[in-house]
Image (cartoon, coloured by chain):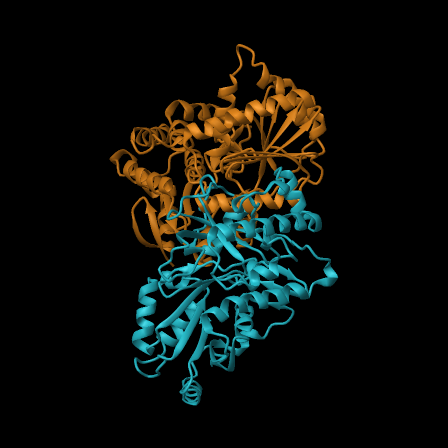
Amino acid sequence: MQLDELMSLEQYSLPQREKQAILTERLRQLTLLHRDRCDPYRRILSALGQEPEEIDSLPEVPALPVGLFKSHTLRSIPEDQVFKVVTSSGTTGAAVSHVYLDAAAAQFQIHALAGVMTHWLGARRLPMLVIDARSTLRERNTVSARGAGIIGMATFGRDHLFAVDDDMRLDRDALAAWLKGHSDSPILIFGFTFMIWQHLVGALEPGEVDLQNAILIHSGGWKKLTDLAVAADEYKAELARVTGLRRVHNFYGMAEQIGTVFVECERGFLHAPNAADVVVRDPATWEVVADGEVGVAQTLSALPESYPGHSVLTEDFARVEAVDDCPCGRRGKTVSFLGRVPEADLRGCSDVQAREALAAA
Amino acid sequence: MIVRQLVPHVGDVDVADVLRGLRRARRRSVGPFDPSRIDFSDALSRAILHDPRSRPFPQMVAIGFWLRRASIQRLAGRFAALEQAGAVRVPRGLAFHVPPTNVDTVFLYSLMVSFLVGNRNVVRVSPNVASEHATRLCELLREVLAEERFAAFADELAIISYSHEAEPTAQISAESDVRLLWGGDESIDRLRAVAVRPGTHDLTFGDRFSFAVVRPDAVLHPEHDRPSLHTVAEELYNDAYWFDQLACSSPRLLVWVGSPEDVDRARRRLFGELSQVIVAKGYGLEPGASISKLNFLYGALIDRPVESVYRSGNELAVLGLSDLGDFDRTHPGAGLFFEARVDSLADLVEFVTRKDQTLTAHGFSYEELTAFARSLQGGGIDRIVAFGEALSFDSFWDGYDLLAELTRTVTVAQAA
């Protein structure tokens, strides 16, 4: 099956067995393609004795650790065909990933993301509220993940309002006026998990706005919320209490695999889209763990052709919750992402240590 | 400025008061290697070695042994030899120690060498990394200092804890006669920029690199009086893994000196044995460390001339390099060895830089190693030791003779 056929299938309709067979063949081909076109990738496969011709299942697709996209340039297209470079979000000063897209790859990602989002939002564009500042977009050439996320999602809405001003404060008047203008229609709200918490839940009085008619899509990780000891169910409960918002979908995605995001269903589980899958590994042995066990997520995506990001070992803990039998009825794997693997605390006396100590200071 | 004091008492303290106390202590202070100083070291040694909590940790046992009476008396003997006729060695005065954040026993070696030659000492430890061992050692120091017979020493030793505030460092530096600055090159540069008196003597222990040389014969055919393969692997384990291979003196590169055929057989045996030792010792990495190591390893496969990869779990990765030209000394720690082969030790002369500290050697004669050290013409390497000795603290460190550096010479003319 070709990729466009895979993309044209109804989202979440493929039983895992079928899906695995299709993805395995596609990822085997991608592995061969990147080996041909990306010299660093070829060096890695060759040094590790990997034989992509023999790939026979998804876990056999060699995975690059995600940190490698931060430290090295990994491209499978000539430099002059780079159309866009997407960078990951990172804390200030930390290295960020660089993901190189040609025009076709950029188009493809939009198409793939649409294939996922229309499933949850419907084909009709909804009035869209962005819980962020317009200034977040103001960067050229390179696009930060937060900016890229907003731009990517913006295509699924209309009459956009950026509800946060450039001083990072909720613009209540603009929000109230905008909501009034769209009181007859369902609306789409998009923002980063923490921004939503801070600027909707945190800034509004209960009942100040009525968002019963809204669908919220949020992403960006729980790190800051974990620091505040806010759990997923409390997050949702507070949203409902303060704004009446009940349709809430978290998603997991990364700069290295834009387009194939994992979206949370009504039951609170994240679903792998048709063009992606996840394998969970034991970090002590890197063997695949049994479903239901926690390990480190390796994410696989059928999309990346311009850079070898089709199989990535993430730095996130995850657990496969169900295969083909989520109570919501969607097929494939459902998964919970359980947060970032904590940074290691090694001993020693090198500058690396000094830098870490300084960073902690 | 108010900082946290850990030794001799726990509590908040003004740096100015700490310095005032240390100034006052000079008048009562006894000389280098005074029997009471040796008694104190021995008492601390006993406290560490008798503590059941030290036993599982070889680095705690190692420092306990280093501090015991017999060992310190050897040091006293060497000190006496330094005092030539007509020259008297006296303490420098106030020593300021800034030990590395994470090699958690170094602060005590630094402190005790200086204490034994009669200096008064203030040690700054970082509050960011709460090391179990460092905390424990401070606790034991407090206990021993609380003994009546050592009461005077409580005025000579202060361990304080503060973050990266500039003020206490400046205050202490302004009064220091000698500073022992350990850590990464960047932190040392920052510390050296702090003003000191013209006569202040700085000893810097920066970021270093260390490697091992092995003759394959010594692995393949250990003679009856030489250590067995298992012992060699265990010693390599101790050298490399006690501090997650991040101690400056831990070997990170292993160079074989011999023919390709011998090396090929020997490396498989040595690293095979090492991987078994690692399992037997129960050494394991946190997931975060395994992931950083993977990032480094994959990067090395791209950037370096890697011709072979041997991996055993997360804990051992050996990257065979086809040559050592432009060798990049960055290293992630946590059980990663670069590996290379040369025909003779002489082939390494070009390779060695001033950054190289400890050469851990197996299968070479004293004469060969001495000749090699001379052939470097000062180009690098501060110590050459046997396997198993890489981490052994010595009063010679980073090319300094600490007994000499921590004291001053007073020459006295023969009576006219």
| Name of the residue lying farthest toward the top | B224
Residue at image location 46% in from the left, 39% down from the top: A285
| Name of the residue lying farthest toward the left | B148
From the viewer's perspective, is B165 left or right of B13?
right
Residue A224 screen position, x and y as percent: 40, 63
> Which colour is chain A painted?
cyan
Can I make out residue A207 in this image?
yes
From the viewer's perspective, is A310 left or right of A209?
right
Is B158 above or below relative to B195?
above
Can I make out residue A96 in this image?
no
Quadrant housing residue B319: top right
Residue B11 screen position, x and y as percent: 29, 51
Q: Nearer the viewer, residue A136 or B329?
A: A136
Quarter of the image where the N terminus of chain A is located: bottom right
Q: Which chain does the orange colour mark?
A: B
Q: Nearer the viewer, residue A206 or B112?
A: A206
How many numbered circles are shown?
Answer: 0
Q: Nearer the viewer, residue A315 or B209?
A: A315
Quarter of the image where the C terminus of chain A is located: bottom left
Residue at image location 51% in from the left, 50% down from the top: A20
Residue at image location 59% in from the left, 65% down from the top: A109
Residue B198 screen position, x and y as percent: 56, 50
Residue B51 screen position, x and y as percent: 29, 32
Is A115 above or below relative to B204?
below
